[in-house]
Image: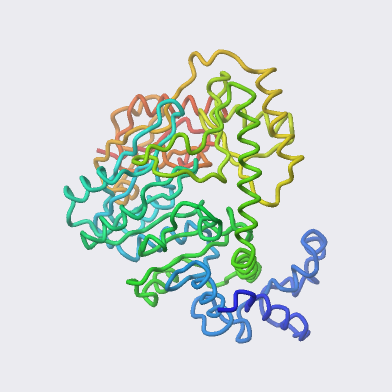
């Protein structure tokens, strides 16, 4: 197929040049109705922020330019079908789960999933069967899914409908996706892959295997994270044995009927860019990341880890574009380094947790900026480094699930001080964001270890989200 085509972009250019008079929404009328916003975003941007109309197709039921963009995207990713998603990868993850699971159905998944996956269980009523990932104790990070652990879960739950896999994790850890997919299909279950951080796998060279190459059934791909499109834009990819018409029905249950043409055109343009230039783009990305990793490791104290942590089982492969850095040996939690980089050095990285930071590198970065990051980390170590004594080390706490997420979320609840909630069943989420992996989820027993973790993360400055109590002093528990 002609990957130089950008059907949505081309249609928008034609529309803009036709000087159409608008008596439809949006009411800013190409920017004239909101001059301040137009000055901020630019007139060209505002003129293509338009509503669905026949020449521009309709995201809910595409038959022309949007459908052409989907076909081109499917070809570029090696998928049978692709859907443009404008509610973020969250909506893609939820569509995957809701398309294969109904209320009461089991789904096997690692507990260190993004909140969007567990939110889908709250909505559709599926029952989670969690695989607890092993942890790299030196780094305090969760690893991938091993074939043995998944095989055990499948044997214990042969009635499960699907298996959900993170690949890669936020830190860059990849599982043996091909072996896992083969195992799941041998038991007549569907394979759903959260590739939110793996867009580049499809276009770079010598990358870990992609979900579509491994013959997974569905994959959620965050184009805006590593593919260059606008924030909130993603693709949902389908394998060979998926009824795409049913998937579209599921997507339309929750995705907006007012699809943003800014987001859709950004997917169209970014797909073309990756299809034509992806190898060069991600070679530059890896070169910059490897240089940064080498220079940071030379500082001492920090551990900018990579493929050396792979064991071929729980960490099958590593995404070398990820600049994941362990900070605990310099006596600082990751979130403390994150805050210091932003507040004192004007450097915004992706996230910091209690033991690590993550910097997202792309071909849009410059060597000068990499040098600035390295120099700032050196200064932070020199000025603020201390003994790591007393720092919490673990990122993952094994959950005790006693009730389904849906039943507990919608149950009658009581409010207790967090410090007094040990032994109770959580009726809401608590998580650090990013990365958005719940510390506690509805239906799980709150333990003293979980309370200590939440209080520690709060003390260190993590952004904690989920509970109705924005101050994270109280938590809603299931009324017994």
Farthest front residue?
Answer: 206
Residue at 72% of width from left, 82% of height from top? 15
212 horizontally vs 226: left or right: left
Image position of 19 with respect to 202: above or below: below
Residue at 38% of width from left, 29% of height from top? 450
213 horizontally vs 388: left or right: left
Image position of 214 with respect to 47: above or below: above
Colour scheme shown: rainbow
Q: Split into 4 quadrants, where in the image is the N terminus? A: bottom right
Q: Position of residue 107 (x, y in %)?
A: 28, 54
Can you see residue 436?
Answer: no
The quarter of the picture where residue 106 lies is bottom left
The quarter of the picture where residue 54 lies is bottom right
Can you see residue 432?
Answer: yes
Q: Nearer the viewer, residue 381 or 433?
A: 381
Image position of 231 with respect to 75: above or below: above
The quarter of the picture where residue 111 lies is top left
Q: Position of residue 308 (x, y in %)?
A: 47, 34
Q: Split into 4 quadrants, where in the image is the C terminus? A: top left
Q: Position of residue 2 (x, y in %)?
A: 59, 78
Q: Position of residue 406 (x, y in %)?
A: 31, 51
322 horizontally vs 79: left or right: right
Count of residue discs: 0
């Amino acid at each position: 197929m002609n990957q130089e085509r950008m059907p949505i972009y081309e249609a928008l250019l034609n529309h803009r040049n036709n000087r159409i008079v608008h008596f439809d929404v949006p009411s800013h009328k190409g920017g004239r109705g909101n001059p301040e916003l137009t000055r901020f975003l630019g007139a060209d941007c505002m003129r293509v922020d338009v509503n669905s109309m026949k020449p521009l197709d309709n995201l809910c039921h595409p038959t022309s330019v949007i459908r052409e963009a989907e076909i081109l995207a499917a070809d570029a990713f090696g998928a049978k079908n692709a859907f443009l998603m404008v509610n973020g990868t969250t909506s893609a993850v939820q569509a995957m789960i809701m398309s294969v699971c109904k209320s009461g159905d089991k789904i096997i998944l690692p507990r260190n999933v993004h909140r969007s996956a567990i939110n889908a269980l709250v909505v559709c009523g599926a029952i989670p069967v969690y695989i607890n990932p092993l942890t790299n104790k030196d780094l305090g990070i969760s690893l991938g899914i091993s074939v043995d652990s998944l095989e055990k879960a499948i044997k214990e739950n042969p009635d499960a409908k699907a298996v959900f896999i993170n690949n890669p994790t936020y830190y860059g850890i990849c599982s043996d996706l091909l072996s896992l997919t083969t195992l799941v299909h041998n038991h007549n279950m569907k394979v759903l892959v959260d590739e939110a951080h793996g867009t580049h796998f499809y276009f770079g060279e010598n990358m870990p295997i992609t979900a579509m190459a491994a013959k997974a059934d569905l994959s959620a791909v965050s184009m805006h994270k590593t593919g260059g499109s606008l924030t909130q834009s993603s693709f949902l990819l389908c394998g060979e044995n998926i009824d795409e018409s049913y998937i579209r029905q599921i997507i339309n249950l929750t995705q907006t009927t007012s699809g943003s043409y800014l987001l859709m055109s950004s997917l169209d343009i970014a797909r073309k860019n990756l299809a034509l230039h992806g190898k060069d783009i991600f070679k530059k990305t890896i070169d910059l990341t490897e240089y940064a990793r080498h220079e940071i490791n030379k500082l001492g104290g920090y551990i900018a880890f990579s493929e050396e942590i792979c064991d071929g089982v729980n960490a099958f492969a590593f995404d070398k574009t990820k600049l994941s850095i362990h900070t605990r040996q310099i006596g600082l939690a990751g979130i403390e380094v994150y805050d210091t980089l932003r507040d004192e050095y004007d450097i915004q990285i992706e996230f910091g947790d209690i033991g690590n930071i993550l910097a997202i590198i792309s071909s849009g970065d410059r060597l000068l900026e990499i040098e600035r990051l390295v120099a700032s980390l050196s200064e932070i170590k020199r000025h603020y480094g201390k003994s790591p004594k007393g720092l919490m080390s673990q990122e993952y706490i094994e959950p005790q699930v006693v009730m389904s997420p849906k039943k507990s979320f919608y149950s009658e609840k009581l409010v207790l001080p967090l410090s007094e909630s040990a032994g109770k069943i959580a009726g809401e989420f608590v998580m650090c964001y990013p990365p958005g992996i719940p510390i506690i989820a509805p239906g799980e027993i709150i333990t003293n270890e979980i309370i200590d973790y939440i209080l520690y993360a709060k003390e260190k400055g993590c952004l904690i989200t989920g509970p109705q109590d924005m101050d994270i002093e109280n938590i809603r528990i299931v009324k017994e």
